[in-house]
Image (cartoon, rainbow, N blue to C red):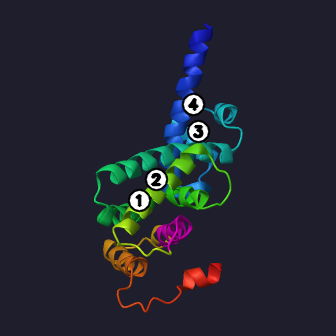
Amino acid sequence: MTRSLRSDAQRNRLRILEAAEVVFAMKGPSASTEEIAQRAGVGIGTLFRHFPTKKALLQAILKELAVRIATETEELVRSGEPASAFYEFFSRMVGQATKQKTVVGLLAEAGIAVSVAKPVNALRDAVEALLAGAQRAGKVRQDVGVAEVLALLTGVCQASMHADWSEELQDRTLAVVFDGLRPNPASDGGPSLLRSRSA
């Protein structure tokens, strides 16, 4: 009997998480817990027994998403060409943000300079590895750090998501961003704006 109750609770938790991922992906963090419970086929009381607050539920979804994206990013680090893997990751994240609204929340959380959940740290570490590879290949400016990459990603993803950019506008915007990230061969070697501000 106890084992059966535990199995039911586990199934309910899984259904809630699956429903929440779909609803949050479509509507973002403003989605209602009632809608999630209805989609999962459970009562609102059951939802709150597993996740006492909407924030706790969103955090669980963000962790799941972070694990998936970190895994994909690590595969790019291992198998991708360093010169192109970084930019492929950036483009892929912007494309995902349009469909998966929780991506923006995940990126914002990864950009916070405090201790965060282990899966989010894994994503940050994977981005750092991609960035380092691109910089070693001479394809990204040396004065760009993970914080700047996450800030740019969050901003572009948020704008693309809220303004419902066309693919053409996404491509043109990314081209401008990428031009800013690449080393400038005409540079006179003077101090960069990023370095001078952090000095």
The three-letter code of the residue at mark 4 reads: Arg
Give the Cα separation between the discs numbered 4 and 2: 29 Å
Quarter that holds the N terminus: top right
Front residue of this view, candidates 96 and 145:
145
Q: Which residue matches tag 1?
A: 130
Number of the label disc, if any, that sits on residue 13: 4
Q: What stretch of residues is rendered in magenta?
A: 144-159
Residue under the point 51% across and 41% down = 19
The answer to the question of whether label 4 and label 2 lie on touching residues, with beta carbons closer than 8 A, is no
Query: Badge 3: how crowded within 10 Å, few (<14), some, or many (20+)?
Result: many
Question: Is disc 1 surrounded by few (<14), some (14 to 19) or many (20+) residues within 10 Å?
Answer: many
Question: Can you tell which mark lies on residue 169?
Answer: none
Instruction: Pick out the residue farthest to the top.
Output: 1
Of residue 187 and residue 50, the one placed in the foreground of this image is 187
Identified at 63% across, 33% down, the residue is 43
Residue 118's spot in the image, x, y percent?
59, 44
Query: Residue tagged by mark 2?
Result: 126
User: Above or below — where is 23 with respect to 42?
Assistant: below
Q: Which numbered disc, 1 or 3, marks the residue closer to the eye? A: 1
Q: CA distance from mark 3 to mark 2?
A: 34 Å
The residue singled out by tag 3 in the image is 37
